[in-house]
Image: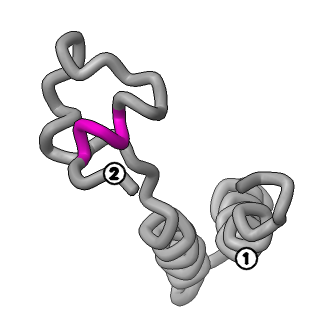
Amino acid sequence: MASNAREVAVRSGVDPDAEPSVDWGWHQNFSKGLPIAAAVTGVVLLLFMIGHPLSWTEFFYMAFPAAVCLVGAVAYPIYKRRSWRR
């Protein structure tokens, strides 16, 4: 098991000399933050539709991206848990 971020980065193929941010741990993905951000974005887009007249243009520019964000927020953790992705 690697003891620090530099060893993890070296094993994953990132050159620590070319990318000094390896020492800060920025080369990991945000597996919990991404679905949370997508869900919050989807909910905020749906909340924008409350309180004013709704046209089809507003519907397509708010409801469709909101649906994509919410579906992605649910599908991403399921996709990451699949055994063949590990």
Query: 17 left or right of 79?
Result: left
Question: Which residue is drawn at the image coordinates 53% and 84% (left, top)?
Answer: 47
Residue 55 appears in the picture as rendered:
no
Q: Are marks 2 and 1 in contact (CB under 8 Å)?
A: no
Location of residue 69 (image quadrant)? bottom right
Instruction: Give whichever of discs 2 and 1 has the lower sequence position.
Output: 2
For mark 2, what is the residue? 2
Residue 16, position in %: x, y? 23, 22
Residue 18, position in %: x, y? 22, 11
**Quadrant including the N terminus:** bottom left
* Alpha carbon separation for disc pair 2 and 1: 31 Å
Where disc 2 sits, the SS reads: loop
Residue 67 vertical placement versus 27 (above, below): below
Query: Which residue ends up furthest to the top in the rendered image?
Result: 18
Amino acid carrying label 1: it is Val
Q: Which residues are magenta?
A: 5-9
Where disc 1 sits, the SS reads: helix
Residue 52, position in %: x, y? 55, 81
Question: How dense is the environment of label 1, judged by Cα within 10 Å: few (below 14), some, or many (20 and up)?
Answer: some
Residue 3 vertical placement versus 33 (above, below): above
Question: How dense is the environment of label 2, judged by Cα within 10 Å: few (below 14), some, or many (20 and up)?
Answer: few
Main SS class of the magenta portion in the image = helix
Disc tally is 2
**Quadrant including the C terminus:** bottom right
